[in-house]
Image (spheres, coloured by chain):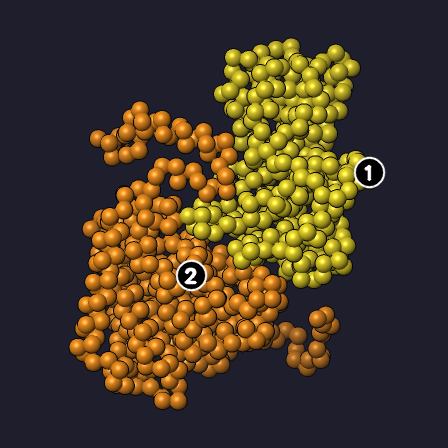
Chain colours: A orange, B yellow
Amino acid sequence: MRREHVVGPPTRHHPREARDYEPGRFLKEFPLHTVIREDGSADPDEVVLPDAEALRLYRWMVLNRALDERMITLQRQGRIGFYIGSIGEEATVLGTAAAMDERDWIFPCYREHGAALLRGMPLVTFVCDLFGNGGDAMKGRQMPCHEAWRPGRFTSISSPIATQVSQAMGGAWAAKLKGEEMVAITYFGEGATSAHDFHTGLNFAAVRKIPVVFVCRNNGWAISVPRERQTASETIAQKAIAYGMRGERVDGNDLLAVYAATRRARARAAAGEGPTLLECVTYRIEGHSTSDDPRAYRPAELVEPWKRKDPILRMRRYLSRRGALDDAQDAALRDEVREQIQVALKEAEAFPAKPPIETLFADVYEEPLWQQREQLAEIEAAVAADPRAANPRHSDA
Amino acid sequence: MPTMNIIQAVNDALRIEMRKDPDVVVLGEDVGKFGGVFRATQGLYDEFGADRVIDTPLAEGGIIGTAVGMALYGLKPVPEIQFADFIFPAFDQIVNEVAKYRYRSGGQYACPMVIRTPYGGGIKGGHYHSQSPEAMFIHTAGLKVVVPSNPYDAKGLLISAIRDPDPVLFFEPKRVYRAAKGDVPEGEYAEPLGKAKITRAGNQVTVMAWGSMWHEVDQAAREAAAEGYDCEVLDLRSLQPLDLETIVASVSKTGRAIVVHEAPRTCGFGAEIAALVQERCFLHLEAPVARVTGFDTPFPYTLENEYLPRAPRILKAIREVVAY
């Protein structure tokens, strides 16, 4: 394990000649790998999924999109407080998640709801999280879109950027120490590559050959800051080189390309060859979240070309060319998905609007301390004495 | 019964728990072959190997991020932060992740770990090898905070902390790491978290401290006794959970309370104790609750003895509170 401190041969360069950054070099070294062209055609040699499986994942992408659109509408109607989705990034989210094994853990950012659902989180449970109601598995404790789903090994989402990157590495390290074959996958945006947890996560993982797939959803924007104000590196993938790990750049709007790249990264990790930084180049079609209006900082014409690269449209063309999906089947599939969401909404609305008051104090510690016990009694007494204590709208009046 | 110092007691506790539970792993900077800059993990690398006594790259945030992932996956990590002053790069992971993981996931996941770190001044360490940041973590719901003052407690409390289902910050008083010696039973024993220890019974004034400040209080109480004062001394040991019952019983009996800590006064844990005492012992109080603390300055180098609450300042407070 111990390696000598390598010095290398002496150079004939003048000591003042620092190595130049060569523009364009890394775009060539990390070419964008694509399988499905925009017109839906594909090189038959690169077809990585049987049509039935491709169709199944297409359906998940359609569901993910329909869910995002429906929930954004719900937010605008004031029925949920907030939403953050993945419109335009579905192939990245689902292609990566589907390529992992069931036993692998997912350490998400906050746009991977599709992956949570793919891992078995019931749609109604997800919707209950958005309502923060009595059916919420998170007991109403977080903003919408901060779900966790332990049965699917989908860890808990937090808002601080990149914290999950080092955690994913720690989880995979634990599995390695226990001698269990588990590869962790973690997601983050290109903005997160500026954060310290990105650095520590990748560095520790490379040093110890920890089995992790680091997925950068490079969607071009960190709220209002474009990718070129985030890093001077031409690609995100090239950052892997400095850490001593593999990097790969893939068309994030191409489900098959994303899937294939993730499979390769997973196989290497499982074989003890260490982590991979996988850059999925995609685009944030909408605002950062429902709290954001990109018209304030992003010209609409920047978005147009990306709409033509839409991952769902591309997959639909691909499946249709292969005779796996015709227009009638597609329409039926879309109706089905909309109905599925409608049913989940209805079921979610049947739960009480709030979780019981004692859940405010549970799970802070495994067992409440005297502070939580006293404070529960305090709020219960306050509400019993005057119900306005639990409803500020009454106090405002 | 062997005599140990605090370092040896910590080392003993780690060894016992690592032998007992294969999921316990130690990680941090220099903790492996070298055995830690204070030698707290000495010999563990040889006994348990590089997989369980892990030298990490130099990044506190990464150490705690790693520990979070390990804890989620089912290991029991015991990360070491080399000095409490260097814990702040990991503040986000501790406050936003470790502390909230169980709560925010609705109890689906838990993140138990013991973050060991030497704290406190009096070792000529200046700003960055002397601070006492315990209050910053007590202020975060979801964390437990333990500060032993002696080898017996260091071992018994560390064993409890490692077995605890919640994350624990374990602050070790480095000024008395080697100076505080005592009898420590061989083998395993657990001192419960959340129990203060009455180290001196008295009726006139309750003086409370934890960690290295307990030694100053003990000395002040002895000197006060020579002057005829009758102090009750509490070693709080566990600040979260806090043994409020013992504090309230003691102050209700004595009618006077002094809190001593070396962290700065403003928003120090003494402020919380003073508030609790006035809420719960108001009618018993004969004098305002006094605080003898570090000052509201960065931790100094040359004037560290002036900064630290030494026994004479505590003795002065005892006289004043009794005379009030």
Tag 2, which secondary structure? Answer: helix
Extreme residue in the right direction? B2
From the image, tell me which residue sits under label 1. B1
Chain identity of mark 2:
A
- Can residue B313 be seen from the camera position used here? no
Name the residue: 56% across, 26% down: B244
Name the residue: 59% across, 55% down: B75
Mark 1: give few (<14), some (14-19) or many (20+) Cα within 10 Å. Answer: few
Chain identity of mark 1:
B
Tag 1, which secondary structure? Answer: loop
Residue A282 spot, x, y in % from top left: 36, 71
- B302 horizontally vs A105: left or right: right
For the N terminus of chain B, which image quadrant?
top right
- Can residue B184 be seen from the camera position used here? yes
Name the residue: 69% across, 16% down: B202
Q: In this view, does B234 lie above or below B211?
A: above
Name the residue: 66% across, 13% down: B204
Residue A161 spot, x, y in % from top left: 45, 56
Is the C-beta separation of discs 2 and 1 under 8 Å? no
For the C terminus of chain B, which image quadrant?
top right
What's the mark number on residue A152? 2
